[in-house]
Image (cartoon, rainbow, N blue to C red):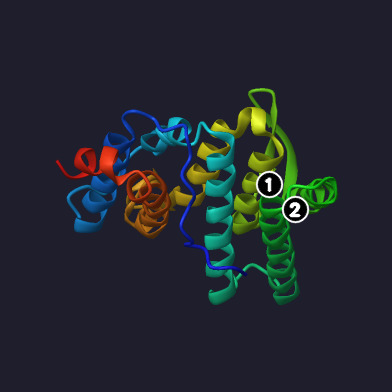
């Protein structure tokens, strides 16, 4: 796998208040890390929709989170409820999907696009459906949260018309955690994932556009 934290290229579409939005994410992570706060609604990440409104930024952002997810999966122990064979096959499939996304964004050919489309049903098949419906939708059972994030990233790259919304969904699934002491949302366990998001956005918007954005982050 290529390095996850390579410098992002400058994008011509720069939200005017990008610095303020990134600073708010930084403040969120700092509050959770310090113990000043223990919970934020996941909607605090809604600003990612505007920060990733450009199709290419959204695609690179989603791929970055997929790369981070794969890296963590490769170094973490399998969950107690997962069979060893499933755990290993999941990691192989995740690695295959990340490599395919990297190849497509580097060389967007019909062949690399077809590979992504063929991978998507294999990724989605990891999860299952309960047969029950809530508000008209069948309840989905998530067997691998890591695989769900890879799925989100694939959808983002394959659906540029909805890229900003899908980039937000990828970020939401990447950072949202549950702890009985706090509930489900952005909680202390979310901090490392929030820091990954902040790294990407800072690298893209602040480092590459530091003259216009540095002051709004630090003031």
Crowdedness near tag 1: few (<14), some (14–19) or many (≥20) residues, C-alpha within 10 Å: many
Q: Is residue 25 left or right of residue 122?
A: left
Q: N-terminal of the two: label 2 or label 1? A: 2
**Numbered-mark total:** 2
Q: Is residue 171 left or right of residue 81?
A: left
Residue 205: percent from the left, percent from the top? 38, 43
Residues at circles 2 and 1 in contact by the CB criterion of under 8 Å: yes
Q: In this figure, which residue is indicated by the disc labeled 1?
A: 154
Cα distance in 3D space between marks 2 and 1 = 9 Å
67 vs 132, nearest the viewer: 67
Q: Residue furthest left?
A: 219
Q: In this figure, which residue is indicated by the disc labeled 2?
A: 123
Considering only vertical position in the picture, is 149 above or below 14? below
- For the question of whether residue 41 can be seen, the reply is yes
- For the question of whether residue 77 can be seen, the reply is no
Residue at 70% across, 76% down: 84
Residue 183: percent from the left, percent from the top? 38, 46
Q: Is residue 93 left or right of residue 74?
A: right
146 vs 100, nearest the viewer: 100
């Amino acid at each position: 796998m290529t390095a996850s934290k390579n410098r992002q290229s400058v994008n011509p579409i720069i939200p005017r208040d990008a610095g303020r939005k990134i600073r708010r994410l930084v403040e969120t992570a700092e509050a959770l890390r310090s113990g000043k706060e223990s919970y934020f609604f996941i909607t605090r990440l809604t600003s990612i929709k505007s920060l990733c409104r450009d199709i290419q930024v959204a695609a690179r952002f989603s791929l970055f989170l997929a790369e981070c997810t794969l890296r963590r999966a490769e170094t973490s122990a399998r969950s107690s409820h997962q069979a060893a064979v499933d755990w290993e096959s999941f990691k192989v499939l995740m690695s295959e999907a990340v490599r395919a996304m990297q190849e497509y964004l580097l060389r967007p050919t019909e062949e690399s696009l077809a590979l992504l489309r063929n991978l998507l049903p294999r990724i989605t098949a990891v999860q299952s459906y309960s047969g029950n419906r809530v508000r008209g939708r069948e309840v989905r059972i998530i067997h691998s949260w890591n695989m769900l994030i890879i799925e989100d990233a694939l959808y983002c790259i394959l659906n540029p018309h909805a890229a900003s919304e899908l980039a937000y969904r990828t970020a939401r699934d990447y950072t949202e955690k549950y702890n009985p002491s706090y509930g489900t949302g952005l909680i202390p366990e979310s901090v490392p994932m929030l820091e990954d998001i902040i790294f990407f956005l800072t690298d893209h918007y602040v480092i590459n556009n530091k003259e216009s954005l540095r002051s709004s982050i630090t003031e």
